[in-house]
Amino acid sequence: MKKELQEQQEKMFKLEENIHGFILKKEEFVDEIDGFARTFVHQKTGAKLVYISADDDNKVFSISFRTPSTDSTGVPHILEHSVLCGSKKYPVKEPFVELAKGSLNTFLNAMTYPDKTMYPIASTNAKDFMNLMDVYLDAVFYPNIYENPYTFLQEGWHYHIENADDPIIYNGVVYNEMKGAFSNPEELLQNKIFESLYPQSCYRFESGGDPDVIPELTYADFLGFHKKYYHPSNSYIYLYGDGEVRAHLKYLNDEYLSTFDKQPVDSEIAAQPMLTQRTEMRASYGVSKEEVLENKDYLALSVVLGDKLSYEDALAFDILAHILLNNNSSPLKEALLDLKIAEDVSYHYSSSLRQPYFSIVLKNTEEKHKDLFVSTVESVLNKLVADGLDPRSVEAGINIHEFSHIEGEYGSYPKGLIYGIEMMDDWLYGDDPIAYLKYKAAFKKFKDSWKDGYFEKLLKRMLIDNTHQTLVTIVPDNTLQEKADQALAEKLASFKAALTPEELQALIDETQTLIEKQNEEDKPEDLEKIPKLSLADINRTGRSYPLEVQEALETRLLFHSGFTGGISYLKLYFDYSDLPQEDLKYLSLMCKLLGSLSTETMDFRRLSQEIEIHTGGLSFGIESYDDVHHFGDFTSHCYVKGKAVMENIPTLVKIMTDVITKTLFTEKNLIHDMIREIKTHKETQFLTAGHVVGVQRLQSYYSQSARLFEEFGGIEFYRFIADLEANFEQKFEALTEKLTSIANLVFTNRKPIISITGTEEIRDRTVTALSPYVVGLAPNKAAKNAFTFETEIANEGFLTAAKIQYVSQGYNIRALGYEYAGSQLVLKGLLSMDYLWNRVRVQGGAYGAFMSIGRGGDLYFGSYRDPKLKKTFEAYQGVVDYINNLELSQRELEKYIIGTISSKDVPLSASVKGEIADNFYFSGVTAADLQKERDEILETTVAQLKSHGDMIAAVLAKNAICVLGSEEAINEEKELFKVTRYIK
Ligand SMILES: [Zn+2]
């Protein structure tokens, strides 16, 4: 923050001054976030408010309520959804969706936590920011849930029956969402860990809702929860950015808070009394009938770390957990992997609870190993306290955490939002919210005292001397699902049988009315109440992505000039087109192993420490780019990237080049452990991110570049890894040879293309450091489309243990003779936020549904955690009619245009812009292309949108589909697929 600006801030108010009803309690400049933080209390209601004034136009607002659960009906979660379904000032079906369609928001969401519910928004446009804030405040204080009981039925749960002869089922958005969540064993494990650690506090309940318990929630209790907790006296308001403090406070007071009076709200999070000895808990999770049950158990050893941790303790523990368990060379993880009793060892740590907890989880293990698990943890920890932690690993842990705090890289999330979320860790339990932002003093303390046993003492206090422990086991059961389904069906059947004809008719009528209400259009005059910007508020030109194509060390240098706070972001792109096609999967595996194995110069433990001591991390992978000007062409690279502060650039480059040219692929145990880990991570992805896997697979039916990516990370890659894992002994020797020769071929043969983001000084220092490595290599060649695959529209249905589906369909429009245009992005917004939202989410009960279109021409539809299958395909077919019959007022059209532009204008850090600029460069996207796309978006007409109907019809006519989902659902619709199979 500039000095004048800071001085101006200092003089603005006096302590205890009343500014539009808010009393200023505390103010200070916070160096770490370069902002001026003020804490206020609203006099009339007791509402708490923090305002951080910073020189950042990405303004953030959030209002949160403390919402402890008293059961697992998920009432906080259902309410989070429901308040966004229409309010006093904005009486439309879903104001939230209207904002998502047509605002310049840079963040818009709502989140339910175990003890709070947060409603954050962000925008860089001052007018838009006020609009978003107003819709959210009206939503939380004046939702239409009291007048309209159908919101509860839709978002929560209801008895769904359309005809008297049908069976009654439960339906509801949150009900289905949580059914999806609970089909993931890790979600169930999490739930059981909470139940075991907090048997008497609110944390034992599932605030998201347990699908078995959700139907116990009554409408009256739902309303009661709102009445009790959604009151200013129980609220935490947060503002961040370059907005006008006085004007914002006046608005909050005059428009909302002043109409309320202080009310005592009992929302205290009661502390769970300490457990004096370890307790155990056991539960089962459902898997498909054919699933082999061996080695599918999970074991979790968890502790509660204390009550209301200080920031220093919370951060120090984060570092300690990292030292103990972060990677395969961390002492505790290594010892547990060496037992050979589990495929994966991971940990969870959350400080977002009054009593933070920590868990160590063994995945794919056997229950019988639980004593060995516990005794190993105990003996390793005791030994570490007695002998001391490896000093280098402590230094590494401190440095890597400090690096990420200084870097402050949160991807597309606004910085201010992250601050707002972090401060809740203290604020919600009555302490100083600003304390959780001041990391500098804590890091100084760690650096000053780690040599004096600081972390050993912490380890002893928080883990060894801690009796508040539990051991949770969850085991697979392949009849559980069937039994549960049957029990539910019977329960609902007997419920139905006991109904009088009048009662039954009432339920049918209720279902009917709900469907009618969902199909009802909002009144245009109501829609107009939702404030919206006009096209005149939108910049005609978009932002630029700095790129200068230069030459250095006789190779291409992509330089992205930008302010990075002294950090060099380096990425090297290697051509791998000399590789035999059958070796592609090995290339991908190699990228996943690099950085974790020993090199000729360093043992793997030492290597991982050196990386964390001197750099901000290294990563390795493969990327491909469809050429936007030549359909069917694509380039692909194997990349290596890393980052470091200026003085560490030479070390960064040294470590990086050592890793790629001197890694030894000979460590059998380590490689075996890592392969197992890769396999289990993929398996989790099939259950939790099936839409990503399904769409990728779908595209591989018709796109060469997508087919290539199946080799690198899709189902093909998974099968390769699963086979390696199962036959590791026989295959290891050949594997070593293969990986060694691939690394030689890719990294010691040709010069890479270099990409650097930073200042010119950073660039020059980085190039100098690279020189010894790059100079001796042969020129690069960057061949296009080096590989060819046989492809066919395979239309597969993949049977998984999930209780829901991921349904995808699509094709490439350029292959069908259509061209990509900006107006298709507006269509994407329209379909995703209107038609698909209504048909697949609101009516179908899926958690999400979307259409997507890329510059390369890939157009697809997908659904997420979807209880339906065939009906979703019917919804996709319905898109054509929807487009053909489309009627859209100018106002509505502008909304979708603004919403589309907003996704293009999300503020990004210099490093992210650098990565995107590389991507554009390799895909042939020019500044003129970007401007053309932006013009096309801004000039989109209804006629243009309607003209895309033919294109969608042509895509759907190709009938290319792929589904991942529950065995029952896929088998029921077998005729839709060419093949149905398990993933393995
Ligand atoms: Zn939800």
Image: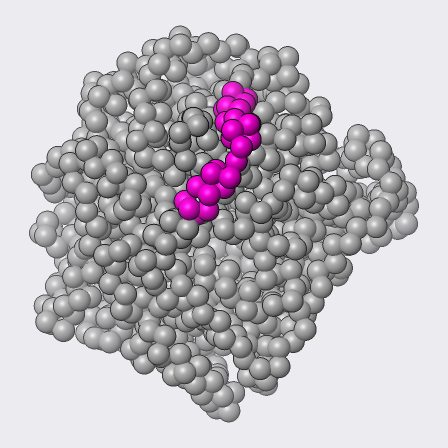
Q: Position of residue 322 (x, y in %)?
A: 47, 70
Quadrant of the rendered image containing residue 933: top left
**Measuring 40% from the left and 79% from the top, which residue is drawn there?**
370
Q: Is residue 909 above or below residue 316?
A: above
Above/below status of 935 relative to 223: above
Q: Nearer the viewer, residue 248 or 140?
A: 140
In the rendering, at what x and y percent does residue 860 appear?
Answer: 31, 30
Q: Is residue 875 above or below residue 983?
A: above
* Residue appearing at x 19%, y 33% in the figure: 975
Q: Which residues are magenta?
A: 488-517
Left or right position of 38 against 522: right
**Corner quadrant of residue 702:** top left
Q: Does residue 604 belong to the magenta stretch? A: no
Tell me if residue 555 can be seen: no
Q: Give the total number of marks visible in the rendering.
A: 0
**Foreground residue among 966 and 760:** 966
> In the shown orientation, is residue 33 left or right of residue 793?
right
Question: Left or right of 183: which side holds 279?
Answer: right
